[in-house]
Image (spheres, rainbow, N blue to C red):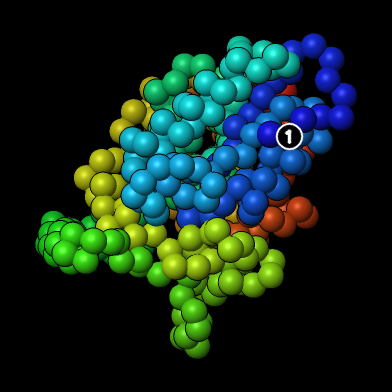
């Protein structure tokens, strides 16, 4: 938890999580600290089964449980002595941007949502990057491979890791892979508990996203939403398409010129904290 230096009365609060496969000591902690410096009570948390959060089996993801993680964070903030329970927002980074939208569609206590450099984890797992494998045959092959892996894991009595960000980095790696490497594998963003910095999720860790879309009811979000994405991010299509589905005059898409995906993880010259602060102050009234 992060608190402003001065607390007078009950304040607005924000729960922060992401990126997908990261830990709170990375980008979410940076966002939480920055927003606390701007007058909000904030928390950055590790998702279930990762980092310092509990739960077994480890290194598993779930659209249901990970949405619930945001709701649990709202539970916690709602009962804090210095928090106004009617003024709670959330920030989701990368894959947690999609989870944040899912939580906002479900939890009416969430009054404002920021999704920064968003991934739709259901879409990328089911369709591949850039929807390159968006066909039933490709998904069937993926299901076959993952279910075969389940038998291997069961026989071995443990879960085989899928590997984090590729290391060593191939010379012909796509730019976005190099972008991830420069963050997760370098001193810039490396952390010993980060899945992406180390062994990654279990190979079957994200299987449930294949047929459980997380943005089905995003068009029913009545609270305010701000989507932020880098113009040159490989993932920008997730935010552009998510924005098209949102309804109401309290939804906004902010494209940051020339920014790439991980610029919105930690680049203080690019992350629009002034805009984020104004967004929450206007919508957590």
What percent of the width, then of the height, locates residue 181? 56, 72
Q: Residue at x 29, y 40 (%)?
A: 213
173 or 208, nearer to the observer: 208
Kindly indicate the quadrant of the structure image that contains residue 283. Answer: top right
Which residue is at a point 23% across and 61% down the rendered structure image? 157
The residue pinned by badge 1 equals: 2
Residue visible at 70% across and 14% down? 81
Q: Residue 207 appears at what percent x and percent y?
A: 26, 53
Above-or-below relation of 219 to 168: above
Q: Is residue 83 above or below residue 94?
A: above
4 vs 167: above or below: above
Residue 212, picture quadrant: top left
Position of residue 157 in the picture relative to residue 34 (left or right): left
Q: Position of residue 257 (x, y in %)?
A: 66, 56
When the figure is inspected, residue 76 is found, relative to residue 252, above or below; the finding is above
Which quadrant does the N terminus fall into? top right
User: For the C terminus, which image quadrant?
Assistant: top right
Q: Residue 182 versus residue 66: which sits nearer the camera?
A: 66
Q: Farthest residue to the right: give it.
A: 6
Residue 182 placement, left or right of 132: right
């Amino acid at each position: 938890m992060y608190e402003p230096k001065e607390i007078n009365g009950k304040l607005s609060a924000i729960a922060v999580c992401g990126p997908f496969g990261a830990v709170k000591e990375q980008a979410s902690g940076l966002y939480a600290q920055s927003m606390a410096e701007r007058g909000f009570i904030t928390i950055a948390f590790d998702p279930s089964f990762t980092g310092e959060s509990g739960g077994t089996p480890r290194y598993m993801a779930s659209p249901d449980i990970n949405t619930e993680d945001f709701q649990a964070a709202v539970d916690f903030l709602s009962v804090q002595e210095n928090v106004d329970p009617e003024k709670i927002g959330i920030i989701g980074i990368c894959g947690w941007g999609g989870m944040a939208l899912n939580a906002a569609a479900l939890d009416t206590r969430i009054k404002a949502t920021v999704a920064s450099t968003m991934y739709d984890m259901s879409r990328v797992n089911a369709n591949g990057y850039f929807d390159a494998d968006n066909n039933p045959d490709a998904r069937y092959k993926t299901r076959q491979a993952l279910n075969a892996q389940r038998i291997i894991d069961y026989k071995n009595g443990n879960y085989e890791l899928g590997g984090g960000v590729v290391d060593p980095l191939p010379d012909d790696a796509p730019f976005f892979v190099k972008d991830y490497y420069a963050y997760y594998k370098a001193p810039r963003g490396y952390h010993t508990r980060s899945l992406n910095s180390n062994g990654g999720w279990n190979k079957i860790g994200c299987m449930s996203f294949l047929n459980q879309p997380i943005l089905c009811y995003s068009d029913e979000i009545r609270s305010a939403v701000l989507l932020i994405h880098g113009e040159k991010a490989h993932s920008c299509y997730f935010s552009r398409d998510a924005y098209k589905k949102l309804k109401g005059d309290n939804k906004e898409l902010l494209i940051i010129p020339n920014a790439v995906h991980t610029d919105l993880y930690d680049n203080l010259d690019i992350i629009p904290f002034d805009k984020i602060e104004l967004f929450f102050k206007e919508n957590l009234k």
